[in-house]
């Protein structure tokens, strides 16, 4: 493991781009009115990149009012019109790809190759997918189910959606929240994490450039306690979609319940990585390192708990540690960097504290420290492998959200699946085996919203993403997301033209 360099490359000019403010309401940038400011910090250098005025309740009210005013026109547009607008949106996003990649790496610390090859292309593909899906909002076919009536089902937009996105994938999470909502005819107010608002604002600006009407997409950059809670509780917001920790998700649910809102929650994860004794060991080792370290481990689907059947366990630990030691930690903007910093020094210190506490009951095989020298000013932490922890220990049960993989042995297939399911979470998992029956059993019995076989992490726009248990409910991406963002209406026509119907006798009169 080494630092690939410490040159100072050009970064995204955030202060210039957002000199007019970091709120996007009714098609324009404005300054927040909370009376407080927040500074976005480059986690790779610790340098300030943007100081902006935070949103307060008045800004949320203005954004909701703009979304409410835009709703009749946008919801009344034909599916084809919305589809055309989203196709133009996808084209603008593709044209601005490098800007988005650099802004995402600046605010999050992602290696530029990850932003360029994962975050941005995935977002463009999402926009293209929902451009097509906007034409497929169909209900059940018409039919005479009662004999005397023709019934059909309409899918209708809900209204103003108030969404809250996390800091780990700001651009992709903005897309996951906004695209299905507006494709279905809703309008939206999105609150990004206050530490990473840049690409959400750019996303909304790109929508305006593509011709999506003012007010359809609005961004309020503020704290969860002030702007977030006000948005969730707002009486004119018909639905809330939240991605973040399970603890905060519980609070969102409490606030949303007070106004009986539709609710979609994508919460924490602690993904198991289950390696059976017939697995391709090299494939599993490569999959574990990539799956554990993507986005510096700040991914709710990241591989965090590797369960390895006893015959492969020692070799897996040795090979995984050796491969982790080759990962190049460094400045996200320097070519050759594999792993950037965590999103903040606070998050880095939180991860380090988990590892330090684990030393009392487990073995840190590799990593377990922040690099010094050229990188000491950034929020860096070395790839870390922990072995020898008990199943009920903190590092096995709690979401660390950093570049840390814990590996434990198991003996029988029954035990492996039981251990995989033995956390409160159920967002994602993987199983590694050459045996189709073993693999198929894992897909049936592991309680998670996504189960990969012989891979870990890939997602695609056509397939849903969402969890079981404490990982929440509802789906992002795919046509299944329309279940969250539409309401179903049954329409029923009488076909008899008879005034006195037979069923009336159950209320008055005789046959």
Image (cartoon, helix red, strand yellow):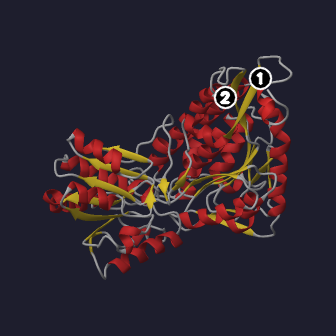
The local secondary structure at tag 2 comes to helix
Nearest to the observer: residue 511 or residue 380: 511
Report whether 310 appears left or right of 379. left
Q: Is residue 158 above or below residue 404?
A: above
The residue indicated by pointer 1 is 493
Q: Is residue 449 above or below residue 72?
A: below
Nearest to the observer: residue 365 or residue 98: 365
What quarter of the picture does the N terminus occupy?
bottom left
Picture residue at 22% right of the left edge, 54% below the top: 413
The residue indicated by pointer 2 is 88
Report whether 319 appears left or right of 493. left
Nearest to the observer: residue 385 or residue 114: 385
Return the disc, 2 or 1, that comes first in the chain's sequence.
Answer: 2
Please say whether residue 210 is visible from this viewpoint.
no
* Residue 289 location, quadrant: bottom left
Count of residue discs: 2
Label 2 crowd bin: few (<14), some (14–19), many (20+), radius 10 Å = many
Question: What percent of the width, then of the height, locates residue 311?
Answer: 13, 58
Picture residue at 76% right of the left edge, 58% below the top: 259
User: Farthest residue in the bottom direction?
Assistant: 360
* Residue 20 location, quadrant: bottom right
Label 1 crowd bin: few (<14), some (14–19), many (20+), radius 10 Å = few
Picture residue at 48% right of the left edge, 71% below the top: 377
Task: Judge depth for marks 2 and 1 and give the one in front.
Answer: 1
Picture residue at 80% right of the left edge, 45% below the top: 67
Question: What percent of the width, then of the height, locates residue 31?
Answer: 80, 58
* Residue 320 location, quadrant: bottom left
Nearest to the observer: residue 498 or residue 480: 498
The local secondary structure at tag 1 comes to strand
Report whether 355 appears left or right of 114. left
> Mark 2 to mark 1: distance in Å?
39 Å
> What label sits on residue 255 in the rendered view?
none
């Amino acid at each position: 493991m080494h630092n690939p360099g410490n040159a100072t490359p050009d970064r995204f000019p955030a202060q210039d781009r957002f000199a007019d403010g970091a709120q996007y309401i009714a098609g324009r940038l404005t300054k927040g009115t909370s009376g407080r400011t927040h500074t976005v910090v480059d986690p790779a250098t610790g340098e300030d990149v943007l100081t902006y005025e935070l949103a307060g309740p008045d800004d949320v009210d203005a954004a909701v009012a703009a979304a409410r005013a835009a709703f009749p026109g946008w919801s009344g547009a034909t599916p084809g019109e919305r589809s055309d607008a989203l196709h133009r949106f996808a084209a603008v996003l593709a044209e601005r790809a490098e800007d988005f990649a650099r802004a995402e790496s600046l605010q999050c610390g992602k290696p530029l190759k990850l932003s360029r090859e994962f975050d941005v292309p995935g977002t463009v593909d999402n926009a293209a997918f929902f451009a097509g899906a906007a034409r497929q909002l169909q209900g059940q076919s018409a039919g005479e189910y009662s004999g005397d009536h023709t019934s059909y089902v309409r899918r209708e937009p809900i209204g103003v959606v108030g969404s809250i996105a996390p800091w780990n994938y700001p651009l992709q999470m903005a897309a996951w929240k906004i695209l299905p909502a507006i494709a279905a005819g809703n309008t939206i107010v999105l609150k990004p994490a206050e530490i990473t608002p840049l690409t959400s604002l750019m996303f909304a600006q790109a929508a305006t450039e593509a011709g999506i009407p003012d007010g359809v997409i609005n961004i309020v950059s503020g704290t969860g306690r002030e702007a977030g809670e006000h948005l969730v509780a707002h009486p004119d917001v018909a639905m809330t979609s939240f991605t973040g920790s399970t603890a905060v998700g519980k609070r969102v649910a409490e606030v949303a319940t007070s106004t009986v809102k539709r609710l979609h929650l994508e919460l924490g994860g602690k993904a198991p990585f289950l390696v059976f004794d017939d697995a391709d060991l090299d494939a599993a080792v490569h999959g574990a390192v990539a799956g554990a370290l993507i986005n510096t481990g700040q991914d709710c689907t990241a591989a965090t708990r590797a369960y390895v059947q006893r015959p492969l366990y020692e070799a897996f630990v040795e090979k995984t540690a050796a491969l982790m030691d080759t990962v190049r930690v460094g400045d996200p903007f320097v070519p050759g960097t594999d792993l950037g910093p965590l999103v903040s020094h606070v998050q880095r210190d939180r991860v380090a504290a988990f590892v330090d506490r684990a030393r009392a009951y487990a073995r840190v095989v590799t990593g377990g420290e922040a690099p010094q020298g050229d990188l000491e000013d950034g929020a860096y932490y070395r790839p870390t492998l922990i072995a020898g922890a008990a199943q009920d220990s903190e590092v096995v049960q709690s979401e660390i959200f950093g570049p840390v993989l814990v590996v434990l042995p198991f003996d029988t297939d029954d035990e492996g699946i039981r251990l995989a399911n033995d956390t409160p979470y159920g967002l994602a998992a993987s199983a590694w085996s050459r045996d189709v029956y073993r693999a198929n059993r894992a897909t049936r019995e592991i309680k998670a919203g996504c189960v990969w076989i012989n891979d870990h992490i890939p997602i695609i726009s056509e397939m849903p993403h969402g969890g079981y248990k404490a990982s929440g409910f509802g789906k992002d991406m795919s046509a299944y997301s329309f279940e969250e963002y539409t309401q179903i209406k049954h329409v029923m026509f009488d076909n008899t033209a008879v005034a006195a119907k037979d069923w009336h006798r159950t209320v008055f009169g005789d046959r």
